[in-house]
Amino acid sequence: MRVKISGTWRDTNPRVKIGGSWTQVKRVWVKKAGTWQLNWGFTYNYTFPSGTYSNYSLTSISGYDPTHDVVITIPSGATFTASSTGNYALRTGSFSGNNLKIINNGKIYGRGGNGGNGGAANGSQAGSAGSAGGPAFYADVACTIDNNGSILGGGGGGGGGGGHEDFDSSSGNELAGGGGGGGGASYGSGGSFPGGGDGGSGGGTAGLTNPGGGGSGGFDDEGSKFSSGDARGGNGGSGGTLGSAGSGGGSGGGAGGSGGAAGANTSGATITFI
């Protein structure tokens, strides 16, 4: 708000004294031609320090006042993540002001889904499906986002590979478990390898942006000159990148598990992107 002091226009932040205490004015209305019109409104501005935040609500900001207009700035050095697919990396929380604007220059990433477990060899069991990634941002109230950074849901977990049992009446059955599916970005855990055969492994755990790779299926060779037929477990599928589904696991004798779906980038109330 600008006022004229000693002939010079100056920016001011108006306050009024109520009960002996100076209180911030929220809005100033003036009457023009018989009609009251909004002339000025206070805006609460906050810029996050660079760093990593988890499961964060804007209402956690010290001194945050949701009764005013609010502008939040997220710098390029700030990263928001979620500790599980059931949490949001960032949410608005309650707000009763007129306008809420978020300027995002940083990273808001949902949690990645976990990889599916590999199928057991006995009976050529199917691999487990990878789990879905989690959401990134939730709007409890309508808001505006100026997005110059990244807002991405977690990647889906990779499906587990199918197990394989090769039936052999003369020399015994060969058994090979399926590889575990890789975790989706960010930080999804890899699925397990159930055992059976040589060289099998669980899926890899994802990093912040890199998904986990699918584990290898086991291998059990025939080992008898009187019979033929090896057992090969399917490889686990790789986890999904941020905002992408995981890959399905490969089949052994049993089918590979499906890849998990990607988490939502945004959800909740109306978000206007500018």
Image: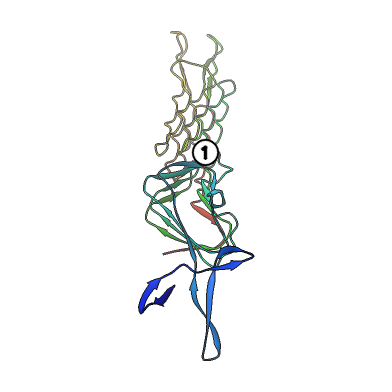
What element does badge 1 sit on?
Answer: loop
Left or right for 197, reference 149: right
How is the model colour-coded? rainbow
Residue 143 image point, x, y percent: 51, 62
Q: Nearer the viewer, residue 193 or 39?
A: 39
Image quarter of the C terminus: bottom left
| Residue at the extreme bottom of the image, as rendered | 33
Q: Residues within 10 Å of mark 1 (few under 14, many from 20)?
A: many
The three-letter code of the residue at mark 1 reads: Gly
Q: Nearer the viewer, residue 26 or 79?
A: 26
Identify the residue position indicated by label 1 in the image: 113
Q: Nearer the viewer, residue 105 or 41?
A: 41
Residue 263 image point, x, y percent: 51, 47
Left or right for 77, reference 64: left
Residue drawn at (37%, 76%) of the image: 9
Seen in the picture, residue 131 relative to 203 is either above or below; the reply is: below
